[in-house]
Image (cartoon, rainbow, N blue to C red):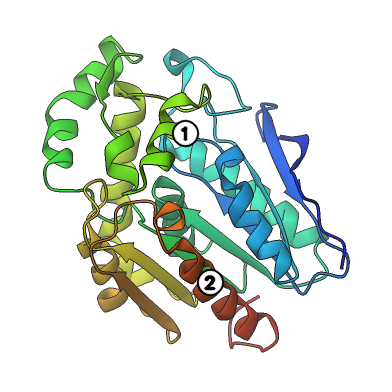
């Protein structure tokens, strides 16, 4: 099996003509295809190691950078609401499903997990299954009030103003990961008011309709996550109508479980979960 060791870069054209930075890590004769959906303020270039692990299992991988993120440059001033993130992701997943000859899965982290869950709630995710890590089904209790009080007003008055910082020490217990995050020129060192308001709105929209999630899913969350609340993943598990659902809570782990010490076990869990469903059919699932 031949795998792409580094991402092949191209573009995906959104419905409004916006050119989105696309990443592809393809393998010959894949058994599944995984669409990655990244979090707020970051980009898919940070997922090379994730793609490598998925490639090794025989999965092709692809995804796009959200608007105003990574290789999809756009001024925060012009960033539309979270609906654009939903529409872009839905269009990209639909395009991948149309052209794929193998079952398609979505792996969404943080805001990306929230985007995927809302699309699942709305019946706009025609895939075999969904994996979410640290999803924004509920924001941390210390973070949400700040966004709720100031983000709405500031997103209209000074949308580019950074209102939440210091995330580097909250993403992982690994100092090397924190340093790489700080040094990455494509990572936003602070969440802007416009983006913060979008994340808050998305989180509230996601949590309001968790009962509508019927897709098979695997949710993984660190219990020491101070960005997204692990209770959101517990609520997803408790309230969703999916007949095939799994919740894994990592004791003491931080927000980015795929970048935590011991992350290889998370990749193994994801690979095992996808592999089992890529080779079997589930009623009502594409």
Does any portion of residue 125 appear in the rendered image?
no
Residue 201 image offset from top left, x and y in percent: 29, 40
Would residue 162 be found to the left or right of residue 184 on screen? left
- Does label 2 or label 1 sit earlier along the sequence? 1
Looking at the image, which is closer to me, 115 or 209?
A: 115
Q: Quick one: label 1, few (<14), some, or many (20+) residues within 10 Å?
A: few
Q: Is residue 178 above or below residue 259?
A: above
Would residue 207 be found to the left or right of residue 134 on screen? left
Q: Residue at x 82, y 58 (%)?
A: 3
Helix, strand or loop for disc 2: helix
Q: Quick one: label 2, few (<14), some, or many (20+) residues within 10 Å?
A: some
Q: Quadrant of the C terminus?
A: bottom right
- The label number, if any, that marks residue 180 in the structure image: 1
Residue 113 image offset from top left, x and y in percent: 43, 55
Q: For the image shown, how many numbered marks are present on the structure?
A: 2
Q: Residue at x 50, y 75 (%)?
A: 269
Q: Quadrant of residue 133?
A: bottom left
Helix, strand or loop for disc 1: helix
Q: Is residue 282 above or below residue 259?
A: below
Looking at the image, which is closer to me, 99 or 259?
A: 259
Does any portion of residue 70 appear in the rendered image?
yes
- The label number, if any, that marks residue 270 in the structure image: 2
Residue 55 image offset from top left, x and y in percent: 72, 62
Q: Is residue 231 above or below residue 22?
A: below
Looking at the image, which is closer to me, 57 or 275?
A: 57
Residue 233 image offset from top left, x and y in percent: 29, 66
Would residue 220 be found to the left or right of residue 43 on screen? left
Q: Residue at x 54, y 60 (%)?
A: 107
Q: Residue at x 49, y 55 (%)?
A: 108
């Amino acid at each position: 099996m031949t795998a792409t060791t580094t991402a092949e870069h191209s573009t995906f054209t959104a419905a409004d003509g916006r050119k989105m930075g696309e990443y592809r890590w393809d393998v010959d004769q894949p058994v599944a295809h995984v669409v990655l959906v990244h979090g707020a303020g970051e980009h898919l270039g940070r997922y090379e190691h994730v793609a490598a692990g998925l490639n090794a299992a025989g999965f092709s991988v692809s995804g796009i950078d959200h608007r105003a993120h990574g290789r999809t440059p756009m001024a925060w001033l012009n960033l539309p609401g979270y609906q654009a993130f939903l529409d872009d992701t839905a269009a990209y997943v639909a395009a991948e499903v149309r052209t794929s000859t193998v079952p398609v899965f979505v792996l969404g982290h943080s805001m990306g997990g929230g985007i995927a869950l809302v699309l699942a709630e709305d019946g706009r995710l025609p895939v075999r299954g969904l994996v979410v890590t640290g999803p924004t089904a509920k924001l941390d209790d210390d973070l949400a009030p700040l966004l709720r009080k100031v983000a709405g007003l500031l997103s209209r008055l000074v949308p580019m103003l950074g209102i939440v910082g210091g995330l580097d020490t909250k993403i992982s217990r690994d100092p090397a990961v924190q340093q790489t995050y700080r040094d990455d020129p494509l990572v936003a060192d602070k969440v802007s008011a416009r983006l913060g308001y979008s994340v808050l709105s998305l989180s509230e929209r996601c949590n309001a309709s968790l009962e509508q999630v019927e897709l098979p899913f695997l949710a993984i969350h660190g219990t020491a996550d101070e960005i997204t609340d692990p209770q959101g993943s517990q609520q997803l598990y408790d309230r969703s109508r999916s007949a095939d659902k799994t919740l894994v809570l990592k004791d003491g782990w931080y927000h980015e479980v795929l970048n935590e010490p011991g992350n290889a076990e998370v990749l193994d869990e994801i690979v095992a979960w996808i592999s089992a469903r890529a080779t079997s059919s589930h009623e009502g699932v594409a």
